[in-house]
Image (cartoon, grey):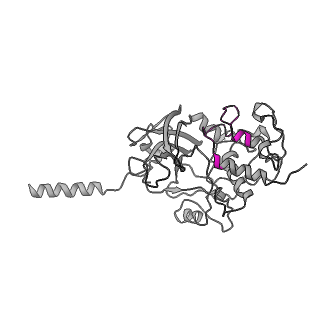
Amino acid sequence: MIRALAAMAGWLALVSASPPAPVSDTAIMGDSLPRNLSEFHFFTDDIGHTPNDRVIGYELNTALFSDYALKNRFVYVPEGQTATYNADGVFEFPVGSALIKSFGYPADFRDADSPVRWLETRVLLRRADGWVALPYVWNEDGTDAVLRRAGRRIPVTWIDAQGEQQSLDYRVPNQNQCKTCHSSNDEIALIGPNARNLNDGQRLAQWVDWSILDRAPDDAPRVPVWDDEGDGTLDERARAYIDINCAHCHSRTGSASNSGLFLGYNEMDEVARGILKRPVAAGRGSGGRDYDIEPGHPERSIFVYRMRSRDPGVAMPELGRGMLHEEGIALIERYIAAMDERS
């Protein structure tokens, strides 16, 4: 009996120590839409914390504002393949790659050990015919996330960094809304993973070492961290913030191309960036103001007016936020106020 129990204990230890199932390339590249996030095997635990082999966590220098939610980002590139470096835009990822991003809120932002309630995980799958964007919503016990193509609203409360309680009817985007933000030339495209926003001095080289990226030039471009006053000038930090929050739609190939407002970090045309630019269609979205950006006058700039609005017909960005980003607005106000007044 003792020997039998010992043998069973050894067998259980062997089973528990066996390697996890690898990432499912079939789930990523197949024609079906997996119902549960766990079917991809991106993580080796049930709660989406421990990444599987070749699933690499990463951060951006300056990230998109999403109602103060915490985000965990991961990238997966199949064994034997690498993403192709691009100095000017997002990297070209091979078929079978995936971008994974989870959104959640700690109970108390002042406490680094505060438990986090994860609400959703969005995945971008690189299939043979292009990228597919899917939203997965976590179940109540946090053991798996279920595909919700129609999106969902989730009530959530937390204590913010100033000790104030906040409440939000958090909006998980539907699949079509994912396509709206990730649209370029009428195809789904990536937003964040480009050289300038990934380059922190070592991340690109690490990706090469880990066989995720094909090369990492020493002169790779870089944008600063938007809220780090020791990192870059006010102009650079504000333009980095505008680039990640606005330029995915406001570009010559984006869904807002007809606005004539192009907000990419490297845009050289000042009028295209909004400076002394009159809106294409002056409706209530202009708030009675004349210019997208009036140098020296944030209070007279449409840009700030729309950032400060919660009206669904006025607010910018149109999707992805229900709250005002007070710190981001303050940065843009300072940026515009510091501009030379022009005739």
The residue sitting at 25% across, 57% down in the picture is 13
Check if residue 341 falls in the magenta segment.
no
- Left or right: where 192 falls relative to 71: right
- Is 298 left, or right, of 154 in this rendering? right
| Dominant SS type (magenta) | loop
Pinpoint residue 6: horizontal percent, then vertical percent.
Answer: 15, 58
Q: Residue at x 56, y 40 (%)?
A: 133
Left or right, 306 with respect to 178, comes to: right
Q: Quadrant of residue 317?
A: top right
- For residue 96, say whether it is visible: no
* Residue 244 percent location from the top left of the image: 66, 49
Quadrant in which the N terminus is drawn: bottom left
Depth check, front residue: 116 or 15: 116
Q: Quick one: 76 or 82, which is closer to the camera? A: 76
Which quadrant would residue 53 be assigned to in this image?
A: bottom left
Q: What span is colored magenta in the figure?
A: 304-327
Residue that sits furthest to the left in the current view:
1
Count of marks placed on residues: 0
Give above or below for 98 relative to 278.
below
Picture coordinates of residue 269, whole percent (x, y): 82, 51
Q: Residue furthest front?
A: 163
Which residue is situated farthest in the right direction here?
343
Q: Which of the pair 184/249 is nearer the observer?
A: 249
In this rendering, does residue 81 appear at all? yes
Q: Does 317 lie within the magenta span?
A: yes
Q: Quadrant of residue 35?
A: top left
